[in-house]
Amino acid sequence: MNGSRHVGTLGVALVAFCGGLVTAISIQQFSGGASQPAQQPTMATTPSPAIEQVVEAAVVVPMVQAPTLAENLSGLLGNETQALTASMPDTMTKMIRPHPVQGPVQGPGPIQYTQAFVDRLPAAKGGRDWHCMTEALYFEARGESVKGIFAVAEVILNRVDSKTFPNSVCGVIKQGVNNPRGCQFSYACDRYPEVYREKNARLLVGKIARLMLDGAERRLTKGSDHYHTKAVNPRWARAFDRMVTIGVHKFYRS
């Protein structure tokens, strides 16, 4: 290129977008000569052909406010909730509504250790622990008074809470079944089948088992975890503290 030639250059064109309106600002051409003073930029009321080409090529995009995070979540969850409600109304109800807490089956008021109190209760039922407890109370204490049956149930649950014994009702009752030294509960090792022959006794001990498993207060045996009948005098009884005697059973705490 010839260095003596003055080349006119187009200044910077600024295009501002505001509400879809375009305002073009141009800076007038400057001469390459040092003798010409710089001129102040002027607002172009009539754009030059070059600027018109730039403006025509520009695409005016309207500004749309993006939805907020809360609006997005609300819409998403709203759609999911409607879908689940329409297809699985029972499932949604269970998810939203808190589960009721079932209290003791005997209702409000303290337990009474009487035949009349137990007779007023509905017939009981339950799972594996209830079956094990009912069996133990029937074959170990059905000939006892109602108070005596409650006391035997207390011993079983006190053992469940102790670190010395298994941590389940069935585990406590069946402990020692395969041990040559014998069982903790004698009926489990007497080699006779567990057959319920007394319907009323079976109904009675089932209700007591349900009460105790549902959290009835243990206030008869003072934390005892052993017992034996008055007809025997086992060696272990000498090492433990005797807490109380109820009916034909003596109760001890190890």
Image (cartoon, rainbow, N blue to C red):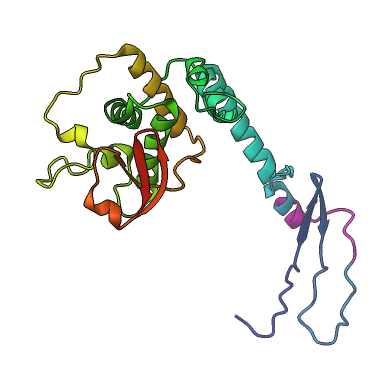
78 left or right of 190? right
> Which x, y percent locates residue 138?
30, 25
Name which residue lies at 24% across and 38% down: 185
> Which x, y percent locates residue 139?
26, 27
Name which residue lies at 87% across and 53% down: 46
Residue at the outermost left position: 180
Q: Quadrant of the N terminus?
A: bottom right
Q: Is residue 49 magenta?
A: yes
The segment highlighted magenta reads 42-53
Image quadrant of residue 144?
top left
Residue 125 visible in the shown view: no
Q: Is residue 200 magenta?
A: no
> Which x, y percent locates residue 150?
42, 32
Name which residue lies at 77% across and 61% down: 14
Q: Quadrant of the C terminus?
A: bottom left
Total labels: the figure holds 0
